[in-house]
Image: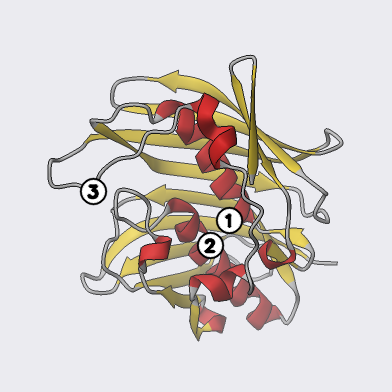
Amino acid sequence: MTARFDDGDLTLELTPQPEMLHHGIVRASVLSFVIDAVAGIPLDQDAGTWTLTSDMSVRMRPMPAPKRIDATNTILRQGQRSATCLVELTTDEGAPIATGAIGFANIFRKASDPPKPILPPEQAPTVFRAHATLSRSLRDEAGIEVIDASEGVVQVEVTPDLRNPAGTLQGAMVALLAEAAAEDLVTTRFESPVVVTDLDLRYLRQVQVGPVRTRGRLLGTGPNAPIQIELIDTPTDAITTLAYARVATAS
C-alpha cells in the first residue's frame, strides 16, 4: 500500500500481490481494508474519540488483478456521533473495479483504553510506503482454521497482529473471516471455484479475546444465492458481526 495527497485529497494505492488474490482476483476483504483506511483516516482526527467502523458494503467486479488499484473517498455525512462515506476504487487505467459504502460510529476514548495514534491525511504518504509482502496466502497468514467447510464454519484467534489500535479485531480481518466462510460453503457444496464479489458487514460488538467462529446459511438452493454469515465470539456465544455475501464463479 502506498498513498498520495494532492490538492487536499487522499488517494490510497494498492499494488496487488499473489498472497492477497483468490483465483487471480483481489479478495473483497483486501478491498475492504482499503475502503476502511481511505475513509477512516480523514475522519479519525480526534484524540479523545475512537472512530470505529459500524457497517460496510463492498461491490466488486470479478476481474483479474490489475497492476494497481486507486481508492478515493467522499464524505457523504459527518456528524458528532456518526459518519458515512462513499469510496470508489479504480484500476491504474481508470476503469472501475469496486465501490464501497462505509459507516462509522464515534466512541469516547476511556482513560483505560490503549493510546490512540493520529494520522493526518497529509502524512499518510510517509506511512503507507512499505513494499513488504506476505510469505503465505492471506488466509494462512491470518491463521484462519477450517472447522466445517460445507457449513461455512471457520474460526480465527484474536492475535495482536489482527487487532486495531483500539485493541479489537480489525474490521478487514472480520471481512476476511466472513469471506472465507462464504467461499468455503459454496465451493464445497457445489464443487465450483468461486470468489466473493458482494460483502455486507454490520459490526455489532468489539472482539478482544476470541476465538471468533462463523456460522453460515445459504439463502437459496444454488451457488448464486445470498449467503448469511454470523460471526460468534466463542467465549460469550454473542454475535459480533452479521454479514451477507454473494459469489461469482471463477473462470
Q: Residues within 10 Å of mark 2 (few under 14, many from 20)?
A: many
Q: Is residue 92 above or below residue 178?
A: above
Mark 1 = which residue? Answer: 29
Contact (Cβ within 8 Å) of mark 2 with mark 1: yes
Q: Residue at x 30, y 48 (%)?
A: 166
Q: Quadrant of residue 10?
A: top right
Q: Residues within 10 Å of mark 1 (few under 14, many from 20)?
A: many
Mark 3 to mark 1: distance in Å? 26 Å
Judge from the rendering whether residue 58 lies leftward or rightward of residue 45; answer left or right: right
Q: Residues within 10 Å of mark 3 (few under 14, many from 20)?
A: few
Mark 2 to mark 3: distance in Å? 24 Å
Q: Position of residue 180 (x, y in %)?
A: 56, 69
Amino acid, disc 1 = Ser
Q: Position of residue 38 (x, y in %)?
A: 55, 35
Residue placed farthest to the left in the image? 111
Q: Nearer the N terminus, badge 3 or badge 1? A: 1
Disc 3 secondary structure class:
loop
Q: Position of residue 242 (x, y in %)?
A: 41, 56
Q: Nearer the N terminus, badge 2 or badge 1? A: 1
Amino acid, disc 3 = Pro
Q: Nearer the N terminus, badge 2 or badge 3? A: 3
Residue nearest the viewer, comparing 65 with 147: 65
Mark 2 = which residue? Answer: 176
Disc 1 secondary structure class:
helix
Disc 2 secondary structure class:
helix
Which numbered circle lies on residue 114?
A: 3
Q: Is residue 190 above or below residue 90?
A: below
